[in-house]
């Protein structure tokens, strides 16, 4: 029997899913929803935080992508997610690296992907899974990473194409995604994290004490949903630890290769960009507390 609630998340690299939406994924799995993760690359260009695995890096053995497949499996086990896929299959698209790096020029880089081809791969998944809700990034990919931007483009184009009966009928029956959300972090939440780090003598960005100075912070009035995953924060921590080449976890904080501390968020936030906003939850801001809010089961 197909679960009545179906969620599809489109992320760029292994570990993005856990950082941005791990608690949300675990919550909906626990509630009996179908949760599908579609990851666009293997994250081959990531820096390796485990010294004894340094030789896996792109400028050495270039085997990090395969290792991160294994890490992602561990993270999904921690979150309870059983449907995890790669866009076009594992290794079809390569990590493009940060903007302006030589990795951007690799012909296999996701940044250079044929958009029509990549969208068709995504439509195939949308029409099979038939999600009511899809989660991805905003048009800047949250913080400007080429693969995040491309994931946004592919996901948004796939939502439109999947609903078009004239588009690639061989990919299955048309399906209209009812609600699309973009991951985000409100300014007030970022400020709380900055202040919490300061209390233990750490900093997020050197010299930054005001979240208003962070370009990826989203104004609270633009946020539409806050999913409470506090009951599943231990699973999110475990999923983060399943990505040891990329994430350092220290108590309630974590850091990536930039070594800049961030707070592990148990409440994850989103912006509704397609569909009707559902009833407000209990937050003082009037945000939805359920991504499926307002949808008929």
Image (cartoon, rainbow, N blue to C red):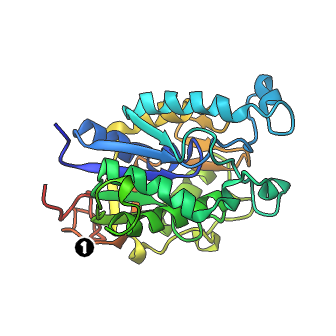
Q: Nearer the viewer, residue 210 or 223?
A: 223
Taking the image as shown, residue 151 lies to the left or right of residue 61, namely left
The furthest residue to the left: 296
Residue that appears at 50% across and 60% down: 119
Taking the image as shown, residue 4 lies to the left or right of residue 206, namely left
Quarter in which the C terminus is drawn: bottom left
State whether residue 183 appears in this view. no
Q: Is residue 92 above or below residue 67?
A: below
Residue 33, image x, y percentages: 25, 43
Neighbour class for label 1 at 10 Å: few (<14), some, many (≥20)?
few
The furthest residue to the top: 52
Q: Is residue 164 above or below residue 170?
A: below
Residue 252, image x, y percentages: 52, 40
Residue 63 sits in quarter: top right
Taking the image as shown, residue 45 lies to the left or right of residue 30, namely right
Residue that appears at 74% across and 28% down: 50
Residue that appears at 34% across and 72% down: 274
Secondary structure of the residue carrying tag 1 is loop
State whether residue 67 appears in this view. yes
Residue 72, image x, y percentages: 54, 34
Q: Nearer the viewer, residue 175 or 41?
A: 175
The residue under label 1 is 276
The furthest residue to the front: 170
Quarter in which the N terminus is drawn: top left
Residue 87, image x, y percentages: 53, 47
Q: Nearer the viewer, residue 209 or 112?
A: 112
Residue that appears at 50% across and 71% down: 218
Taking the image as shown, residue 226 lies to the left or right of residue 118, namely left
Residue 296 sits in quarter: bottom left
């Amino acid at each position: 029997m197909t679960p009545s609630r179906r969620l599809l998340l489109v992320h760029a690299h292994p570990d993005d899913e856990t950082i941005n939406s791990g608690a949300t994924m675990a919550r909906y799995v626990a509630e009996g929803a179908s949760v599908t993760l579609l990851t666009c690359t293997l994250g081959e260009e990531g820096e390796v935080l485990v010294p004894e695995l340094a030789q896996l890096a792109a400028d050495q053995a270039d085997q990090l992508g395969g290792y991160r497949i294994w890490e992602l499996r561990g993270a999904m086990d921690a979150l309870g997610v059983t449907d995890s896929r790669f866009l076009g299959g594992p290794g079809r698209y390569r990590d493009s690296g940060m903007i302006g790096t030589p990795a951007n020029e690799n012909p296999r880089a996701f940044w250079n992907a044929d958009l029509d081809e990549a969208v068709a791969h995504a439509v195939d998944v949308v029409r099979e899974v038939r999600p009511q809700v899809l989660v991805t990034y905003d048009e800047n990919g949250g913080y400007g990473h080429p693969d995040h931007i491309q994931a946004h483009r592919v996901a948004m184009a796939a939502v439109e194409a999947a609903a078009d009966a004239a588009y690639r009928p061989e990919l299955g029956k048309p399906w209209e995604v009812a609600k699309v959300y973009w991951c985000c972090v409100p300014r007030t939440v970022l400020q709380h994290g900055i202040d919490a780090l300061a209390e233990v003598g750490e900093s997020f960005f050197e010299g930054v004490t005001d979240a208003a100075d962070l370009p990826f912070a989203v104004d609270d009035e633009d946020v539409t949903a806050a999913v409470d995953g506090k009951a599943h924060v231990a699973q999110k921590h475990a999923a983060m630890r399943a990505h040891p080449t990329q994430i350092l976890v220290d108590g309630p904080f974590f850091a990536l290769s930039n070594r800049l501390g961030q707070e592990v968020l148990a409440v994850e936030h989103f912006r509704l960009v397609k569909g009707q906003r559902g009833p407000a939850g209990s937050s003082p801001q009037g945000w939805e507390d359920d991504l499926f809010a307002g949808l008929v089961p």
